[in-house]
Image: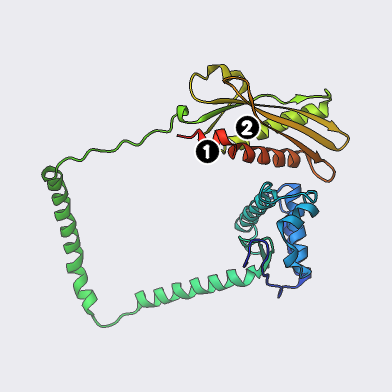
Amino acid sequence: MASEEGGESDLSQDPASVREQLERILASPQFHAPERGRRFLQYIVEETLEGHSERLKAYMIAQVVFGRDASFDAQNDPVVRIEAGRIRRALERYYLVCGSNDPIRITIPKGGYATQFSSGENTSIASQVAASQDHENLQSQTGQQGPTTYRHLLLPIGVPALFGAMAILALIRPLESYLSPPQATRTPVASTPTNRIRITVDPLVALDGTVQTANFAKGLGDQLIAKLMEVQNLVVLTPGRSGAVTSGPHFNLQGSALVESTIVHLHIRLIDGADGVVVWANQYDRDLSGQTILDVEDDIAVQIAMEISKFGKLGDAGP
């Protein structure tokens, strides 16, 4: 793969066989990927088979697979890059757990989104043949009787000499500890909670009071907690524990959600716990058509966590 969004693929494989392998992967319970990840894999495989690898750019994939509009910016919205990494790991796990004997191996080399196809069977057979030949050579060498060589004569002498040298070194090391002046040991600075930002994720408000919106708000809140816990120098607190904060910066993440037909409207704001000032706010609108609720929640949570991690106050408040 020469560039981040372009690349080359081995098209020597029969397209029909590649498509059969793709269906085998998607049908396997050992292929752990959400629905949008499966659509992503199908799209890039088909584009590669059709010879359109040059079209596999983040901008095009975001519109075709993830339903983004023409204003999509890959720098501010890493959804394609994140999903590519997730599918790479899912493919590696599949071939490690149950697909090692599959006839075709589908991979997504890092640096781009075009797939590569290789013969997994030939690779495994070649490895087995090489291992078998090495084992036979080793057996033939150990079983062969020949004239006595210098190695056979030195072996009984070399082993005792080695143990003797180790014993001498064991005696020298304690003497060095007595003769050399003591050195002060450096105690590593522990990462304490006082060095990090505290943020409380308050329950999101369902504006229309429907069960659908309430479930979406609850699921998004759980996803926000999970994603924010991955941000360095950030401590995530449950809502009931915010009063226990005695030192260090503290923020509250609040928001409201509204589901109208297939459109989700979300308002998020970050509030300084010291004075109640709104230091950051944003609005997110998503179309649920063709996507699962879990995919939308995960996508929005990733984008919010990324924006908060780059936010000025949080970025400058580290140790």
Q: Quadrant of residue 15?
A: bottom right
At horizontal 14% and vertical 42% (from top left) the residue drawn is 181
Residue at image coords 59%, 21%: 273
Judged from this view, the residue extending furthest toward the bottom is 147
* 98 relative to 52 in the view: left or right: left
Q: Which residue is mark 1?
A: 232
Q: Which mark is residue 225?
A: 2
Q: Quadrant of the N terminus?
A: bottom right
Residue found at the far top of this picture: 243
Image position, residue 63 (x, y; %): 79, 52
Along the line of sight, which residue is nearer the eye, 32 or 84? 84
Amino acid type shown at disc 2: Ile
Pointer 1 with pointer 2, Cβ within 8 A: no
Residue at figure coordinates x 74%, y 55% from the top left: 59
Residue 144 position within the rendered picture, expressed as x and y whole percent measured from the top left: 34, 79
Q: Secondary structure at mark 2?
A: helix
Note whether residue 20 is visible: no
